[in-house]
Image: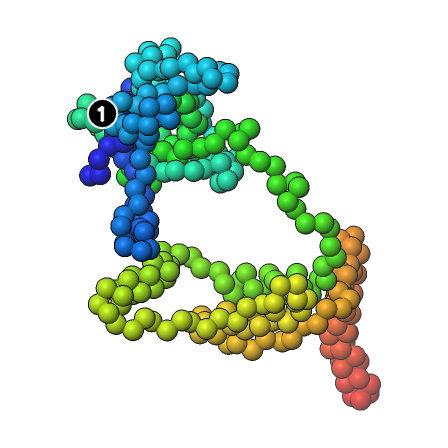
Amino acid sequence: MPRPLWTGAISFGLVTIPIKVVSATENHSISFHQYHREDMGRIRTRKVCEIDGEVLSQEEIGKGYEVAKDRTVPVTDEELDRMPLPTAKAIEIVAFVEADSIDPVRISDSYYLAVDGQVAAKPYALLRKALERSDKVAVAKFAWHNRERLGLLRVREDAIVLHSMRWPDEIRSPESLAPRETELDEDEIERAVQLTDSMALDDISGFRDRYREALEELLAAKSEGKALPAAAGAEKEEPGKVMDLMAALNASVKEARQTRGEDATVHEMTPGRPRARKKAAPAGKKTAAKSAAKSAAKKTAAGKTTAARKQPARKTAAKKRTAS
């Protein structure tokens, strides 16, 4: 198990669940160091006091808040720990909501909540089952790194996951970023929908970090003194170039179908008037038409039955006239 980042408890009404918080993700990015180009000397960041110029260790560094220019109020870790905050050592569940009601843009980091001791096994399983059967997620408050945070608890396989969330006032409005209203042709919209259907997947677990793989090949080649991998050719659109939207959509649908091994035939669409569609008859007219058709069918059937009944009588009368 990864090293716990925080230990505490989940507060679930009057139920307390001792837990350990471990990271739910791993960082596989390749990191670089800064160095001096001339002699390849490593460049390091040092924490230096601006008054005496001394390089300080972490033990010599404290926290402080600047209340005014040239005036800083020191704050110790002990003072922060003694703050009367109920979420200082607990993840306090405050509500249960539908998962769809949470805007994904508010979710930041993700953590697994592991049981801390056998005493936590039963209440942990109880909370997990309650979340599963209710089809809801839990909204919680907790305090980490000297600030209170908002969190979201949900179930992933057999574990409870904690998503750190931003407060509502931390989310910027996208109103100023939205483009101005523009006219779209119905054919363009239909082709865009076809493109989404052509690119639809049920599972995205097969995606890989191609950039990291290419970077590993580059570093391996340089360390072994080999030739560097050839650059992949990519055509770039000229900035400001007017794009033929429908042509791009047609080509995209064709490429997506070829990638999936489907029939790549694409009936070309060109922007124009929306295609006329047959209007459906009103419900009342449909009902009247059906009733008329049924009545006509009944009359026809009745006429045939009457004619069939009269036919034997006519034959009998004709036989009598012949006999006389």
Q: Which amino acid is tagged 1?
A: Ala
Q: Is residue 175 above or below residue 265?
A: above
Q: Is residue 115 above or below residue 77?
A: below
Observer-nearest of 68 and 92 = 68
Please state if 217 lies on the left or on the right of 253 as rendered.
Answer: left
Q: Position of residue 113 (x, y in %)?
A: 29, 32
Please state if 324 lies on the left or on the right of 13 as rendered.
Answer: right
Residue at point 33%, 61% (across, down): 215
Quadrant of the rendering where the N terminus is positioned: top left
Quadrant of the rendering where the C terminus is positioned: bottom right
Q: Position of residue 294 (x, y in %)?
A: 74, 62
Residue at point 58%, 64% (across, down): 194
Q: Which residue is mark 1?
A: 120
Residue 91: quarter of image: top left
Q: Position of residue 93 (x, y in %)?
A: 39, 23
Observer-nearest of 284 and 135 = 135
One can see residue 226 in this view: yes
Observer-nearest of 237 and 121 = 237
Residue at point 61%, 37% (across, down): 173
Number of residues whose C-alpha sits closer than 10 Å to that of mark 1, classed few (under 14), some (14–19) or many (20 or more): some
Q: Position of residue 273 (x, y in %)?
A: 78, 66
One can see residue 91 in this view: no
Observer-nearest of 10 and 38 = 38
